[in-house]
Every structure is written in C-alpha cells, then in structure tokens.
Amino acid sequence: MSRKRIGEGEEAVRAELERFRQAVELTRQELIGVSEKADQLVVGRELFEVHLLLVQDPALIASVERMIEEQRVNAEFAVGSVLRDAVSRFESIADPYLRERSADVRDVGRRIVEKLLGTERQALDREAGPFVLIAGDLDPSDTAGLTRDIVLGFATEKGGATSHTAILARSLGIPAVVGLTGLTDDVNPRDTVIIDGIHGKVVVRPDEGELLFYRELKRKFDSIEESLCSLAGEPAVTSDGHEIELAANIEFSQEADHVRQYGGKGVGLFRTEFLRLLSPSADEESQYSAYVHVLEVLRPDPVIIRTFDLGGDKFFPDSGISEANPFLGWRSVRVCLDRPEMLRSQLRAILRASTHGNARVMFPMITDLEQVLRLREILDSVRAGLDDEGVPVAGDIPFGIMIETPAAAISIDLLVEHVDFVSIGTNDLTQYTLAVDRGSKLVAKLFDPFHPAVLRQIRDVVRVVHEAGKWVGVCGELAGNPLAVPILLGLGVDELSVATMLIPEVKRMIRVISMSDARMVAEKALRLPSGAEIRHLVHSSVAGRYPQILLEEEETE
C-alpha cells in the first residue's frame, strides 16, 4: 500500500482510526460468515476462528493504531506495514508448520485492506464447474469457498502439506497437491488432469490405464476415510487391551475445541511460541486467556503447556540476533533463562490458569541438570509470589522436560529424578543426532527419524524413565506416522501426541496391533541397520491389518 499522510490535527487522526476500526469490524463480520459457512468442517471452522482471533488481536490493533497516530499515515499503509512484519516473522522460520501460518496473517490483512479500499475479489465458487483448479496459490478463505460439486481437486505452485489451504482441502474432502513449482506452465485449459492427493502427484493428460488405476484408488480411499471417521468415539486401546494416551499437538487455543471430535484425549503439546511470534508484545493477560480456554474446554484431560520455544529460526527480523549456526546457538530454554522476566510472565499466566483444568508445564531443549534446577527454582519462586498476592494456583502441577538433544537422552538418569514426566521431541532429536538441518533442502533426504541412532535413544530414555516410576510421551512428528506407532508402543512409550487431524489414523494403528506384536517389531527394528529397512519391517508386519493406502502415503513423505 502506498504511504499517504493524513491531514493535520487530532480530528484527522480520529477519522483515520475510525476508518480502520470500521474495516476491522466489517472483516470480523465477514469472517463470522465464512466460519459459519465452514461449520460442517471441524477444521474449517477452527481455522477461521483463528482468523477471527487475528483480526481482533489487541497487540496487532494497537500497533496499527500507534502507527496511524505517531506517523500520521493512512490506515491502509499502517495495516500493510504491521502485518507485513508479522508475515516476515513467520516466513523466516524453518519449521514448515509455523512458517505456513504466514498465509493466515496475509489473508486477514488482505481482507482488512479490501474493506478500507472498498474492493472485493470474486469468489471462486461463482465459477462454472465441475473442474480441476490449477493456481499459483490460494488463500485459506479462497479454499473455504470451494465445494466438491464445483471443484474436483486443485493444485498450487506455493504452499506445503501443513498449510491451512492444504488442511482445509482435506477437511472438504477435495484432493489437493501444493508446492509444485512451475505447474501452471505445464497445464493448459481443458486438459484432463488427475490430482493424486495421497501421493502428492499431478498427472496431466493421463492415458486410459492411468485413468482406470486412479478410479479404483479413489474407491478404496473413500471406503477407508469412512471407516476412520467412525473411530472418534472409540478408545485408543491395542487389540490385546492396553490403553494408550493419545493426545493432540496444538498451536492455537481454539484448536482445543475439536480435539475430542477427532478422538483425542487432552493436549500433549501446546506450542505457545505462536502467541509470541504473532504478537511480540503478547502480555501475561493475553496468554492467561489462551491457557484458560484450552484448560476449560478439555477439563479434566491433561493439557501440557510448553514454554516459549524461541530462537534458532524463530526470532523476529528486527531482533538483531544473527548467528552462524542458530540451531546450535541461543534458542529455546536458553533464551528464557537469559530473559527470566519473559519466562516469569509466562509462568505466572500458566499458574494462574491452572485452576481451570488439568495443567502441566513443560520446558523445551534441555541439555543439562543445571537448567532443570534453575527452572524449578524460577517456577517455585513465581508460585510463591502468586501465593503472596493471594492468587489461587492449582495444588499439583506436573513439571516436565522435553528430550530433544542427545545430551538429554544420554544423561536422562541424571535428569529424571528432578522431573515428573518427559516428552520426546523427535524432530529436534533427529536433527541433532544426525547433524541434519531439517530446513535445508540440500540435506533434507538425510533427515530420518527411523534412523537406528534415534530409535535407540528413545528406547534408552523410556527404560530409564520407567525405572524411575514416571511416564514418557512422544510429541514429535514421528508419533503421527502410522508406521512408527508399533515401534513406539513396543518401546514402551506411554503417550503419543500428534496433529489433531492425524488422531484417527494413529488410533486405527493402535487398535489393530497387539502389545506383544509391537514389542516384537520394536526388538527386530533395533537390530536393523537403516531407517528404510525398519520401515519395510513395520510395513510387512501390519500388512492386511492397516489400510495399504495410508501406509503408502507415509512412505512417500
């Protein structure tokens, strides 16, 4: 947006602020309509409730209004500037899930600017169908306007598997493939196109054999999807009666509203850094409100709130932090311990919210005992301060740590006596064990959580933690991979925490395998020399009991 100076005097400022507030209100009403339209979609409504949070975020609104007042610029420029900064914070993150949240911020900003300019974009669902949609990119709100009757499938050049556009497509039941660079140059209008959302392929101008193959594949997949939906109310119990805790990983407080609808029990990982990344000035009260919502919605199920995992690739562009090896530098709990006031503010919010449900607090990227002892000391100090103020706090809040580094895994016997539980973060554990930057395209093929070195560390951690009489979970992406479930159960993991939408697939695997079979698979897996052979072992072990299509999907990732 072009920068324009507004008139002189307070009246001009008040008028511009009123323009902005009206645009925000119109956008809010529009998003309510989109959310209601997506009401039949569990995830669809959830994501647009997130957009509603963004458009009403006090910190973002305050930043725009401050720019209007102090720099005397038009509202369009102020909105664009503030949200552009927020987008850049997310786009600089290596983690694909967090990075792709930038699309949500961009979508909300576009809506507000459209209201300010008085322009509207034509909705996709007004086009004649049915057709396959090929585009450079789609906003989440564009996707929500699609219907299966009109759009048979779509593919875009931008986006990733964890983008909200892809998530909404899955909820709508529309096959989608995203992130295919150069796609629009290869497809012509009226071409026959197959969108293979299972394997991430687009077949342009298929022959008769390909058409027959994909018609049969679609029939099988539709049948499997129907059977998975029926599992939501069923317990996560192995075929021989062992119950497994199956929880959700969430980033937004509103995601808690749908955990049980997918069949999950509580939250195994609340990634709170999203609150901070969206609004660097996020204060204690805004955090408190988010935690209370999750705890009340899921009470009495447990909610594990992880403290800010900032640093590495999760710094703000204007932070002034620059390191040659950021993932080996100032990140996560190291940042929090060096900035204790930020940590104390978050812990105050967590402890205050703890009376509203079953709260647990967890600290990421632990590497030595001194960190654990200092964190305990700070937590106890914050609790004592709240007691002095007469602020009620839950009597017993379990204290946990994440095992994400070889240092923590190897020295788990030194750490476990000082904590109540541990959760293994397989994403970072794999990254640090294999010395592979998971955000680097050059070495991405070497990133393998099935690597024997990773699985052996999980085995050792589980053994030591159980010997201490405590429980251990896995909250990294490995927990959401059906092929990994038999191994993790066989190693004795007590809890699996996965993306909400993956809960049915993971539960299906839990229910078709016995603990005795899982232990046998894990024992054999630990003797194999490569991740590829381990995957093949599990695949052959569950063949005939678990949908082949879903296993193929995992193997292609």
Image (tube, rainbow, N blue to C red):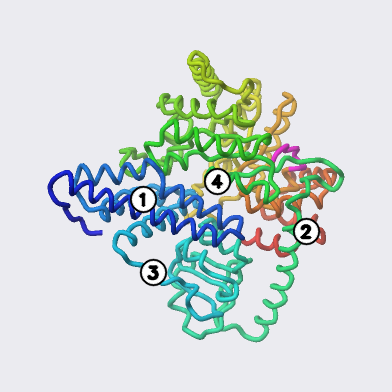
| First-in-chain label (2 vs 3) | 3
| Three-letter code, disc 3 | Arg
Tell me the CA gap for discs 2 and 4: 31 Å
Residue plotted at (68% across, 84% down): 209
The answer to which image quadrant residue 192 occupies is: bottom right
- Look at mark 3 in the image and give the residue it sits on: 121
Along the line of sight, the residue nearer the viewer: 342 or 210: 342
Q: CA distance from mark 1 to mark 4?
A: 24 Å
Residue 269 percent location from the top left of the image: 59, 39
Disc 4 residue type (three-letter): Gln
Whether residues under marks 4 and 3 lie with C-beta atoms below 8 angstroms apart, the answer is no
- Taking the view exactly as shown, the residue that stands out farthest to the left is 8
Other residues around mark 1 within 10 Å, as few (<14) / some (14–19) / many (≥20): some
> Which residue position is annotated with label 1?
88
The residues colored magenta run 489-495
Residue pointed to by mark 2: 546
**SS assignment at label 4:** helix
Between the residue at mark 1 and the residue at mark 2, the CA separation in whole angstroms equals 41 Å
Query: Which residue is the site of mark 4?
Result: 254
Disc nearest the viewer among 1 and 4: 4
Helix, strand or loop at mark 3: loop
* Residue drawn at 57 percent across, 37 percent down: 404
Foreground mark, 1 or 3, reads 3
